[in-house]
Image (cartoon, rainbow, N blue to C red):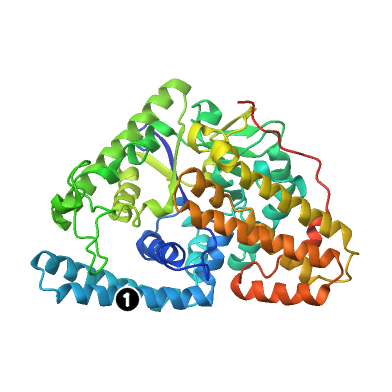
Amino acid sequence: MSAREPVGTFCLVLHSHLPWLSRHGAWPVGEEWLYQAWAGSYLPVLRMLHRLGEDGLRDVLTLGVTPVLAAQLDDPYSLRGMHDWLGNWLLRAHEAAGSGNAALAGLAAQEHRAATAALTDFELNWRHGGSPVLRPLVDDGVIELLGGPAAHPFQPLLEPRVREFALRAGLADTERRLGSRPAGIWAPECGYAPGMEQGYTEAGVARFLVDGPALRGDTAFGRTVGSSDVVCFGRDLPVTYRVWSPRSGYPGHRNYRDFHTYDHLTGLKPSRVTGRDVPPEQKKPYDTALAAETVRRHAAEFVGVVRDRLTELRAEHGRPALVVSAYDTELFGHWWFEGPLWLEEVLRGLPEAGVRVSTLRGAVDAGLVAGPVELPASSWGSGKDWRVWDGELVADLVTQGSDVQNRLLKTVDHVPPPLGRDPLLDGLARQATLALSSDWAFMVSKDSAADYARARAALHSGRVVELSDLINAGRRAEALSAVNRYDRQDTLFGQLDARLLTGVTTFRAQRPVS
């Protein structure tokens, strides 16, 4: 290897997603999730990417933004709510400063500066939505943007026509917002069933993500899938898990800010992790300088891990190879307060260490593709199979989702074809799309706000039942009144055209053998 030749290529992939939360509760579950992730992750991560772009860096990382999240980041209601939330953050910092609690004094000053910076960024750059913030990064080649199905359904459990409809609607939504159609997607939950690449080819999808075990850990190159030209990339779990795994990772280090410990007067987080089993009242005060030093150490360590892994893969394969690390964007800043700083240190440090940093598109262009491969049914969830979305705990949701799809398709097929768009069928499709979000089963399986998830799934499924019954009975005036009422709450995917459900797709997913 020459002194100038990179040892290999590193691709960082971030998956940005939240379900539709606007106008569906605020606290403790609902819009608060959106505003916390927006302030903690989306603002600082995109600020960081703009800095890197201004410094001339290109192909920095691959960023997935689901259509349902993009809709919220562009929604005027959510934008007003976010501005109010940031103002409230500043007020909470002032309240901490005047609390008389000496331990909060230093924290209050830090929070005042952070809230002021976030407000300034938001008012200057975000007041017209997230799309104007993202588009320059895409147009200038700083990032590759991944799209996906409209409301993040678990695709293997969808009827063929519904799966095709959701994917095409999601890709079209991204194209409308950002001016270009993504060639890659983050398959929701990395869910895959053999044959799904056929639908990807027809929809113009050229690449997607799977988890490492779907490739039996052989993730050194992208792989063409089956007889198609569609390329899948697998997460390199030995590297990825150094940052975050089900059991360990950098965010749990004792010097980082503790996510779970609050000052109950102000809602601010005054403590560092201190120790895994240390009770909240015994945790040490957060130390910014100590945390920053730990970030630098962990970033340098990760750079070394990536370089060592690529050196090992180069020796094994006889040519430069690829490491793909993929995470939820919300890990960086929201769950792991120091995460955005760590990201920037890593993205600047890897090239200095002789590692080429690129996007998935860049990896394909560089020829880092082998193939073909036959993929098994898989996901990135527990067990790397479908159990989180198709297991015993959520059997009722699976049945409910099947009924939603059957009602949607039967209604679309039953109603005489309209000359133009039919607002009743479009409204029905919108509620079905929301009912089929993978988030509801995930939250139930993981016992994370499970009651909220069941309530949301039941709400949208109930609306599908109501609308389909009214439409099929010819009670169009009542159905239109209901659609208008629901659309005032669910102000997303206004372009959703139910006529596209009349197409025919032959592929049907088969459940994995347990």
Q: Position of residue 19 (x, y in %)?
A: 53, 58
Q: Is 98 on the left-hand or right-hand side of 459?
A: left
Amino acid type of the residue that numbered disc 1 sits on in the rendered structure: Asn
The residue shown at (65%, 33%) is 225
The residue shown at (40%, 61%) is 37
Badge 1, how many Cα within 10 Å: few under 14, some, many 20+?
few
Q: Nearer the viewer, residue 284 or 174?
A: 284
Q: Quadrant of the C terminus?
A: top right
Examine the image and state in which quarter residue 391 appears: top right
Q: Position of residue 58 (x, y in %)?
A: 44, 54
For residue 323, above or below residue 404: above
For residue 186, above or below residue 42: above
The residue shown at (36%, 53%) is 332
Q: Nearer the viewer, residue 284 or 444?
A: 444
Q: Quadrant of the N terminus?
A: top left
The residue shown at (35%, 49%) is 347
Q: Position of residue 87 (x, y in %)?
A: 33, 78
Q: Position of residue 326 (x, y in %)?
A: 45, 43
Q: Nearer the viewer, residue 32 or 398?
A: 398
Examine the image and state in which quarter residue 312 appears: top left
Q: Is residue 497 visible?
A: no
Say which residue label 1 marks.
Answer: 88
Q: Secondary structure at mark 1?
A: helix
Q: Is 478 on the left-hand or right-hand side of 183?
A: right
Q: Is residue 137 visible?
A: yes
Examine the image and state in which quarter residue 421 appears: bottom right
